[in-house]
Image (spheres, grey):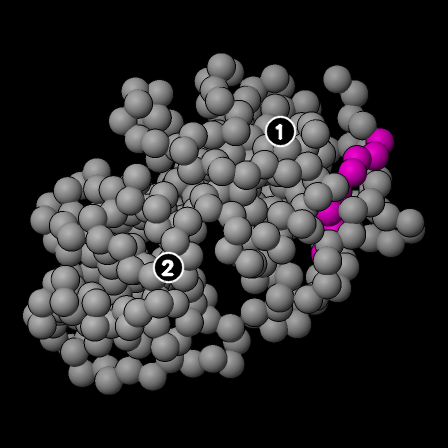
Amino acid sequence: MAIPKTMKAAILVEQRQPLVIAEIEIPSHLDIGQVLVKVHYTGICGTQLGEIDGVKGPDRFLPHLLGHEASATVIAVGPGVRHIKVDDTVVLHWRKGLGIEAVPPTYKWQGVTVNAGWVTTFNEYAIVSENRCTPIPSDSDLQVAALFGCAVTTGFGVVENNAKVKIGESLVVFGAGGIGLNIVQAASLVSAYPIIAVDLHDNRLNLAAKMGATHLINSSQTDARSQIIEIVGSAGVDVFIDNTGQPSIIEMGYGLTKPQGRVVLVGVPRKGKEISIYSLPLHFGKVLTGSHGGDCCPHLDIPRYHNLFRLERIKLRELITDTFSLGDINQAIQQMREGHIQGRCLVSLSL
């Protein structure tokens, strides 16, 4: 297939404003290590909401494309690409995998340069780095495959690699969105107990129960701290995982964990919103750490988790509760903000 000349994309033009849906020009050739793919389904992650909101401060790269988890088919490969071939079905992910980290592409829109990183997915086609693609079987479920780009690998990686949860350890997951639900499921796989899911929305908590949560707390209706203590006892919880990035919740988790407990931060606080803790417990075994995508290794972990799904050992179709077209992506984002999306929200690039 020839490289298409244009494509429809959702562009972040201005922070804290809706994305602009527009037709943009695609570069006419591929550079070393670049791969052209047709995107099928992409997830919307809290990271993109953070980019739109400017949680890390002013954005120097506007206008630019967004998105970091998707299923796709390879259309063409650039010079030097060895691990991906034309017609491969692939997962697009933001963590580095096998292959070249290529120069990021630039697109054109009405004479303006539109920037992109090593992977973007809110676009019909994408030029991505080889090391942001991992092949999967051609008969894979393309909706589910999108989740392996972030939601599954991050959620499972947090439990396996960051928290290193042991059988029978107690665990709190604060924030039961797409990643939080997979943290719950991974904790259930390793027989953690109790698994306490905390969220503001009952619809997400109901899904968390199906994923393996043993206790549910709606923090908009009750004091989460006292409820957690009532469940685990005054000795505290073994593992506290925060997906919200809220300093008050991080501080609460730090105080609730045992002397040798672990606090893992998945959510990122807004720039300028510092946390305040008494650091002495860190010298005696308590751990406070940030997760970088669950520290997953995509080319090893995606096939491993994908095989579990094919064997029906994990639930992933149940996590996909809403699907939108690219033209309705701003509506999808707004529904996520308002808590109407129960599980993972997908955008179909074919609708």
For image coordinates 71% across by 34% down, the residue present is 124
Q: Earlier in the sequence, mark 1 or mark 2?
A: 1
Does the stretch in magenta take in 200? no
Tell me if I can see residue 127 in this picture. Answer: no
Give the answer, above or below, for where 123 lies relative to 80. Answer: below
- Horizontal and vertical percent position of residue 173: 30, 57
Q: Is residue 193 left or right of residue 207?
A: left
- Is 296 or 44 nearer to us in this picture? 44
- Give the magenta-colored segment's residue range: 5-12
Q: Residue furthest top?
A: 139
- Name the quadrant of the N terminus: top right
Residue 289 seen in render: yes
Who is closer to the viewer here, 19 or 88? 19
SS type, badge 1: strand
> Quick check: 174 left or right of 267?
left
Q: Secondary structure at mark 2?
A: strand
Disc 2 residue type (three-letter) = Asp
Residue 187 pos. (x, y %): 23, 45
Between disc 1 and disc 2, the foreground one is 2
Mark drawn on residue 199: 2
What residue is shown with label 1?
40
Question: Residue at the spot x=30%, y=20% of the render?
Answer: 311
- Residue at left offset 68%, top offset 32%: 349
Which corner quadrant of the image does residue 275 belong to?
bottom left
* In the rendered image, the vertical position of residue 174 relative to residue 134, given as above or below: below
Q: Residue 242: percent from the left, percent from the top?
A: 34, 62
